[in-house]
Image (spheres, rainbow, N blue to C red):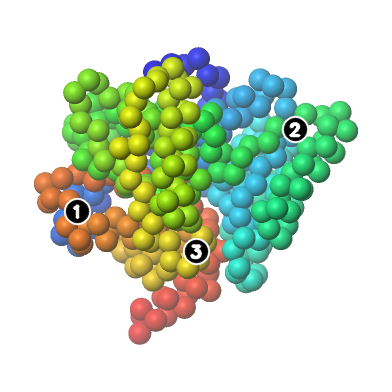
Amino acid sequence: MELDRFPRLSLAHLPTPIEPLPRLSARLGGPQVFVKRDDATGLALGGNKVRKLEYLLADAIEQGATTVITSGGVQSNHARQTAAAAARLGLACELVLPEIVDIPSHEYRHGGNVLIDRLCGAKVHVVPDGAAAQQRIADIERRVRNDGRAPYTIPVGGSNALGALGYAAAAVELLRQCESGDQSPRQSFDALVVANGSAGTHAGLLAGLLAGLAEGQALPRVYGISVAASAEIQVPKTVRLAEETLSLVGIAGVDVVRHVTVLDDYIGPGYGQPTAEAYEAIELAARLEGLLLDPVYTGKAMAGLVDLVRRGEFRPDQRVLFWHTGGAPGLFAYESWLSRRLDESAG
Ligand SMILES: *Cc1c(COP(=O)(O)O)cnc(C)c1O
């Protein structure tokens, strides 16, 4: 795999640890569950986007960019990590945040990730919807060019093939950890569970595993838990992105389709809309392991893992890796919902 020919910045604390979750595993009574701590990538409260930004912003700098532009929901973790990375690199940052999630609370609109965007010096543009966001991005690009500066626009979630390379590299990191037994027992995993939003994480991991596994080594099944779109939309998107990522690293002719599993049963009413199952997962992880999940991504992904275990998807001797993608800053944006649930569960 030709990963090394792409310029890459060092922004994340790597490798991220792999930790067992013994109390959660015991409670669920199924396989041994482990966590890959990409919530601990370090930059401004961490998360999965830092790995993508190592490649995307290296490209931006190579192209002479002065201003980074990106987009995401108001509580976008991707926007926050981009703002922090831009600050660290001395680049200007403009964030276009469509109000695609109908949560009018003060903490949703101003707390959590948005607060950190502003602390890191990003210019925040809140717009009504996706169409307005596209329009605004074009306007900003024009203004930046007219000022004699150079814009670099990153797609939602950093999910193009270049961004997904961050997760191809993460798959290689995982394979090395499994081999060396440095941070984890010297064994492989039977399955990976990861949130799938804009698909770059899932697609990059698959591409990296397919490219990095030695001949004859078994590919762990990767379960992508969709947090927004139906499997009908998300499967082809993930397949296409994995194929593009593989072709970027010089690998052709891999049958990607049969390896892509996306489950869309844990979305609830929609993207960013919390569910009872996500709450249960958040509470379990916090109370049994001191591990923080979020209502938008990792809570739903863990709800998927919990449900798969309860439905007998895994044998007790199997090892399942929950790929934690971050998002805990979003907890503070959902303070009223969480407090209400906590009061209810306290009785
Ligand atoms: C963006 C994000 C995801 C989803 O990653 P994609 O590459 O967009 O599929 C999952 N978890 C968190 C916390 C995120 O911020």
Image quarter where the N terminus lies is: top left
Q: Earlier in the sequence, mark 2 or mark 1?
A: 2
Residue 111 image point, x, y percent: 62, 62
Q: Earlier in the sequence, mark 2 or mark 3?
A: 2
Q: Is residue 113 above or below residue 335?
A: above
Q: Residues within 10 Å of mark 1 (few under 14, many from 20)?
A: few
- Looking at the rendering, which quadrant does residue 321 occupy? top left
Residue under numbered circle 3: 270
Image quarter where the C terminus lies is: bottom left
Secondary structure at badge 1 equals loop
- Ligand 1 neighbours mark 2 (CB distance < 8 Å): no
Q: Amino acid at mark 1?
A: Glu
Spatial CA distance of label 1 from label 3 is 25 Å
Spatial CA distance of label 2 from label 3 is 32 Å
Secondary structure at badge 3 equals loop
Q: Amino acid at mark 3?
A: Gly
Callout 2–callout 1 Cβ contact below 8 Å: no
Q: Amino acid at mark 2?
A: Pro
Q: Is residue 93 above or below residue 307?
A: above
Q: Is residue 338 above or below residue 183?
A: below
Residue 2 image point, x, y percent: 43, 16
Residue under numbered circle 2: 151
> Does any portion of residue 40 appear in the rendered image?
no
Could you tell me which residue is drawn at 52 percent across and 19 percent down? 6
Residue under numbered circle 1: 313
Spatial CA distance of label 2 from label 1 is 47 Å
Task: Judge depth for marks 2 and 1 and give the one in front.
Answer: 1
Could you tell me which residue is drawn at 34 percent across and 25 percent down? 254
Secondary structure at badge 2 equals strand
Q: Nearer the viewer, residue 207 or 326?
A: 207
Residue 346 image point, x, y percent: 36, 80
